[in-house]
Each structure stands twice: as structure tokens, then as C-alpha cells.
């Protein structure tokens, strides 16, 4: 296994309702050739332009909560990643990043189906209808809810199919309205015919939700582990 995580998951809150861009600051400038994963959820409807040089893998301009996922092979200069919105209204958001070693690649499966629910719910699913690529290393699910109130007051937050909840960020800010964000991960026991998960909670109030599902793959599994990771994932 050669893929390693050079910078672990990092969630940032951007609380201004009138901003037309946000900056996601990495912990440090990645080495050239490493791979940068940047995703986020934005309150209400807006378009999102990725930082310079990033590939736009997902960009959904939804009614209640928009979402995006960008990816880049680092050129060794990235630090402050600027995402630009199509307007400056109701753009509170949360962003999340990972930095992987150069051996990582990504497959994005949110389009099958496109999981966005514009009615108030307590659960949302993302599914892969195609076979996974070779050597899956890590599944990452990004779940967003339109506001903090419903999901944060719920109980028994859970996810199925071998995924685990890695982090839940239900922090709000004045004047409020920042989306809730949950990250789920899977590092072993992949279903090669197709992956899926359902994230749900009990109690609380319902809300509009989105979900994204991506699989990080190892492109060189026979080589020694690369980079200097913060931690390793094992796969059986």
C-alpha cells in the first residue's frame, strides 16, 4: 500500500452571510505531486468556482444547500485555497480538506444517484451503481444539512455498510445559518460491485440534506508507503 494521508481531515467554518468567496487554509504547503481533496456545503443556492488549477468534480447549485468537490495534483505552491461564489447572498458554508500522497487517485460517484433532498428529512443515502476501480483505499462521504438546529438536536447519528462517522461539525456562528457537516469514512471491506451508505439520526427536527461519495484509490499498491503521513489506514 503506497497511499498515505499527508494532511489529515480539516474542517473550516465560514460564517459570513454576505461573502462572495471563502479561503480554506491548508496546514502547510503540500509537496509537489501530492493530491488535494477539497469539498464543501454552502447555505442556499449558489455556483462555486474552484481555486486556481483545481478540477471541478462535483458542483451542485441546489435550492436549499449547494455542494462541491474539487481535486488537484499539487504543484507545491498551494496553501490558501480560494473558492468563489456566484453571488454574495446567504453564502455561509463549511469546507473540508485532505491531502494524500502522490499515489492516490479519486473516483467520484455522487452522480449515481445525485443525492440531494429538497424536503425535510432525517436521513440521506449515496450509492455507487458501477464497480469500483482497482485498489480502493478509502471511501469518503460528505453529508451536509441546511442548518444546524435539526441535526444537532437529534440523537443516535449513524451510518451503515461499514462506514463510520469520522467527524460531525454542528458549530454555528452569528448571525447563524451555517450548514451542518458530517464526514463518514471507510477503509476496509469494500464492496467492489458498488458502495453505498445511509446517514441518519433520530429525534430533533428534519432538514434539507445533501451527500457526496468518493473513493480514493491506490495507483501503486506494490510499492513502499510514500510521504510522511500523520497516520496510516490499514486495509484487510
Image (cartoon, rainbow, N blue to C red):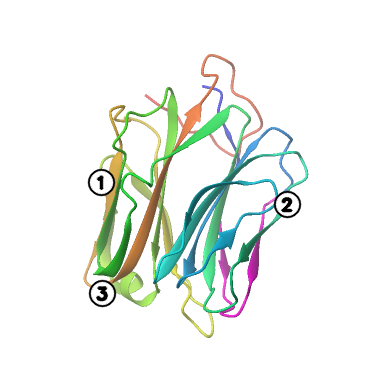
Q: Is residue 215 visible?
A: yes
The residue located at (26%, 41%) in the rendering is: 161
Q: Please give the residue where the numbered disc 2 appears in the rendered image.
A: 79
Q: For residue 215, which numbered disc appears in the image?
A: none
Residue that numbered label 3 is attached to: 204
What residue is drawn where x is 37% and y is 24%? 236
Which is more toward the observer, 94 or 9?
94
Q: Nearer the viewer, residue 148 or 115?
A: 115
Mark 2–mark 3 Cα distance, whole angstroms, equals: 38 Å
Q: Secondary structure beneath disc 2?
A: loop
Q: What separation in Å lies between label 3 and label 1 (alpha carbons)?
A: 20 Å
Distance between the Cα atoms at labels 1 and 2?
A: 34 Å
Whether 144 is drawn above or below 193: the answer is below
Q: Counting residues from the N terminus, which is met first, the one under dot 1 or under dot 2?
A: 2
Magenta stretch, residue numbers: 9-27
Residue 72 percent location from the top left of the image: 63, 41
Residue 10 shows in the view: no
* Residue at 51% in and 68% down: 46
Residue farthest to the top, as pictured: 222
Apparent side of residue 104 relative to residue 215 in the rendered image (left or right): right
Q: 10 Å neighbourhood of mark 2: few (<14), some, or many (≥20)?
A: some
Mark sitting earlier along the chain (3/1): 1
Residue to which mark 1 is pinned = 160
Task: Check residue 45 for magenta coloring.
Answer: no
The verdict on residue 26 being magenta is yes
Instruction: State if disc 1 and disc 3 touch (CB < 8 Å).
Output: no
Say if 183 sits above or below 1 in the image.
Answer: below
Which image quadrant for residue 16?
bottom right
Amino acid at each position: 500500500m503506497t497511499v498515505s494521508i499527508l494532511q489529515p481531515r480539516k474542517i473550516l467554518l465560514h460564517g459570513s452571510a454576505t461573502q462572495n468567496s471563502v479561503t480554506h487554509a491548508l496546514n502547510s504547503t503540500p509537496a509537489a505531486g501530492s493530491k488535494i481533496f477539497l469539498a464543501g456545503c454552502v447555505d442556499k443556492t449558489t455556483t462555486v468556482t474552484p481555486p486556481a488549477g483545481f478540477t471541478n468534480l462535483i458542483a451542485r447549485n441546489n435550492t436549499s444547500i449547494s455542494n462541491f468537490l474539487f481535486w488537484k495534483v499539487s504543484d507545491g505552491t498551494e496553501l490558501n485555497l480560494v473558492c468563489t461564489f456566484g453571488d454574495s447572498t446567504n453564502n455561509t458554508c463549511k469546507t473540508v480538506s485532505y491531502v494524500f500522497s502522490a499515489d492516490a487517485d479519486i473516483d467520484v460517484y455522487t452522480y449515481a444517484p445525485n443525492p440531494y433532498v429538497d424536503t425535510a428529512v432525517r436521513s440521506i443515502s449515496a450509492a455507487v451503481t458501477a464497480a469500483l476501480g482497482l485498489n480502493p483505499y478509502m471511501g469518503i462521504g460528505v453529508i451536509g444539512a441546511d442548518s444546524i438546529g435539526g441535526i444537532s438536536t437529534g440523537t443516535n447519528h449513524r451510518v451503515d455498510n461499514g462506514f463510520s462517522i469520522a467527524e460531525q461539525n454542528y458549530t454555528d456562528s452569528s448571525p447563524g445559518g451555517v450548514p451542518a457537516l458530517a464526514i463518514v469514512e471507510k477503509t476496509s471491506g469494500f464492496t467492489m460491485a458498488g458502495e453505498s451508505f445511509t446517514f441518519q439520526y433520530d429525534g430533533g427536527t428534519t432538514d434539507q440534506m445533501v451527500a457526496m461519495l468518493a473513493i480514493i484509490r491506490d495507483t501503486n499498491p506494490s510499492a513502499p508507503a510514500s510521504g510522511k503521513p500523520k497516520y496510516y489506514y490499514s486495509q484487510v
